[in-house]
Image (spheres, grey):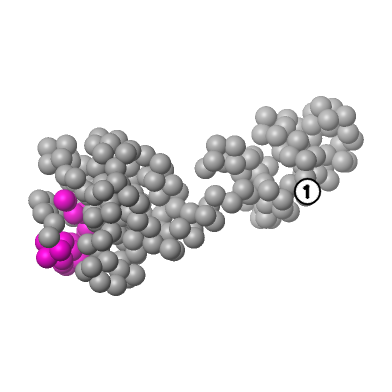
Amino acid sequence: MVVADDSVLLREGLVRVLDEAGFDVVASYGDAVDLLADLTAVAPDIVVLDVRMPPTYRDEGVRAAIEARSALPGVGILLLSQYVEVAYAQELLSSGSGGVGYLLKDRVASLAELRDAVERIAAGGTVLDPEVVAQLLGRRHDPLAALTPREREVMALMAEGRTNAAIGRQLVIGIGAVEKNVTAIFQKLALDDSGTDHRRVLAVLAWLSSRTGG
């Protein structure tokens, strides 16, 4: 195994805990860059890493996990963090052939629980904290589910870049009816007129996201 966490105390503590649990930790890293640089040479069975690491402390760990799965498709991945990064977690769960886990540090109650999670990942299984599952399920909710069939037609034409007038001609309805449907779409997608965000663009992005499963 290899471990990556920017906190020296947490990293060394995790290495010691994993050693006590009977696992062979062959290397540890303070950031994702060093981890990825050594990855193919070390060729670990499992990578344990934090989600937020230098330099931006946002999602470097999750993105590194995805890169690790690309370089070593069978490697097991255990994200052990205080945060849930939904956007990349979905991509990680669908990548590679090895086991994958995502646990929240504060909710790992015992050494036995950690050992069990690592063993399940090593066997190709999936281990997810309930909070991670809840947020992933929330992300999979179709933001367009509340739209009527007509509103979906209007939304599809908006996604093609059509103006309200062009949409009216295509659907053979008046421009007033188009505007009414567009307003309903904005309301159902909770796209308030803030004066800064372009609601039409945001609505189209929601439509494209639903079409691609993102």
* 44 or 207, nearer to the observer: 44
Residue 88 in sight = no
What secondary structure is found at the residue carrying circle 1? helix
Amino acid under label 1?
Answer: Thr
Q: Which residue is mark 1?
A: 183
Instruction: State which quadrant residue 94 falls in.
Output: top left
Magenta stretch in the rendered image: 1-21
- Place residue 164 in its image quadrant: top right
Task: Please identify the dominant SS of the magenta region.
Answer: helix
Residue under the image location 11 percent in, 54 percent down: 24
Query: Residue 11: x, y in percent?
Result: 18, 62
Q: Is residue 112 left or right of residue 145?
A: left
CA neighbours of label 1 inside 10 A, class few (<14), some (14 to 19), many (20+)? some
Q: Position of residue 39 (x, y in %)?
A: 17, 41
Q: Is residue 131 left or right of residue 162?
A: left
Q: Is residue 4 left or right of residue 99?
A: left
